[in-house]
Amino acid sequence: MSGCNFHSVLVTGANRGIGLELVKQFLRKPKPPKWVFATCRDPQGGKAQDLKALASKHPNLVILQLESTDEASIRAAAEEATAHLAGTGLNLLINNAGVMPPSTLETMTKENTLSVYQINVVGPMLVTKAFLPLLKTAAKKSGEKRLSCSKAAVINITTIGGSIGNPPSLNTFPVIAYRCSKTALNMLTQCQSLEYNNDGILCVAIHPGWVKTDMGTEKAELTVQESVRCIIGTISTLSEEQNGRVVNWEGRPVLW
């Protein structure tokens, strides 16, 4: 981890859970990023109080309003980030925002399934597209020749539940729409890696483990602090070898 420095990082869905902890741990690094952008739907709402408290102590933390299903909101966030970055580009985009509503094969409907896809798949696609110019700028300005997260990278937070090659049972993971959406997100990551490779942008999907969050419940195996500490350690070591792949919080390949 010590060999990887991030000039700028943006995390979506940063007002709670894994997203909030990512922001906290990036800010606590011995050499924190010059800019940490934390996005959430309602920066003025009660659910953003922890972020606002952090921002009052860290001038390098910028809270951006971003609704991943609203293209105007995404464009506005990208414009605000561009102004802060002042031509330096964005090194690391972490698409963390997502939803996991209950759904079984019996209860799934067209409407609730499409709603999950809008947030978990279309959202990361639109956000990455909007911030792509900043990622390209960072890659061009970097002195590094090899792909890395300190050069320019997109990290999509996925789940083992989206694995086709080694799927967990429906008894332990019965959220069908969520699982299907994350399988689609894995393919989006693969396509992004193929498209953006020549621009010097690394694209990887990371399974954070079963984490004690609102989505993961208290029965989960990992604390959010443990998961995020490993995620940042893994992010710091990613290279061409993992481009387009799915790995877990420890950097191990996930069969998807």
Image (cartoon, helix red, strand yellow):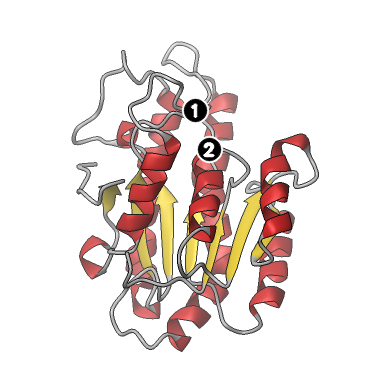
Quadrant that contains the N terminus: bottom left
Quadrant that contains the C terminus: top left
Q: Nearer the viewer, residue 117 or 253?
A: 253
Residue 3 higher or lower than 172, as above or below: below
The reply, left or right, for residue 168 in relation to residue 218 is: left
Q: Residue furthest right?
A: 44
Residue 172 higher or lower than 52, as above or below: above
Q: Find disc 1 in the rendering and name its residue.
A: 215
Secondary structure beneath disc 2?
Answer: helix
Secondary structure beneath disc 1?
Answer: loop
**Residue type at mark 2?**
Gly
State the image coordinates of residue 167 (x, y, percent, origin top left).
24, 29
The reply, left or right, for residue 158 in relation to residue 117 is: left
Other-residue count near label 2 (Cα within 10 Å), few / some / many at <14 / 14–19 / ≥20? many
State the image coordinates of residue 136 (x, y, percent, origin top left).
49, 78
- Residue 64: tell me if it is visible: no
State the image coordinates of residue 127 (x, y, percent, origin top left).
57, 58
Identify the image quadrant of residue 255.
top left
State the image coordinates of residue 15 (x, y, percent, origin top left).
63, 43
Residue at the location (78% across, 39% down)? 45
Residue at the location (36% across, 62% down)? 203
Residue 199 higher or lower than 153, as above or below: below
Q: Which mark is residue 231?
A: none
Other-residue count near label 1 (Cα within 10 Å), few / some / many at <14 / 14–19 / ≥20? some
Q: Find disc 2 in the rendering and name its residue.
A: 17
**Residue type at mark 1?**
Met
Contact between labelled residues 2 and 1, with CB atoms less than 8 Å apart: yes
Residue at the location (51% across, 67% down)? 32
Identify the image quadrant of residue 234.
bottom left
Q: Nearer the viewer, residue 197 or 41?
A: 41
Total marks placed: 2
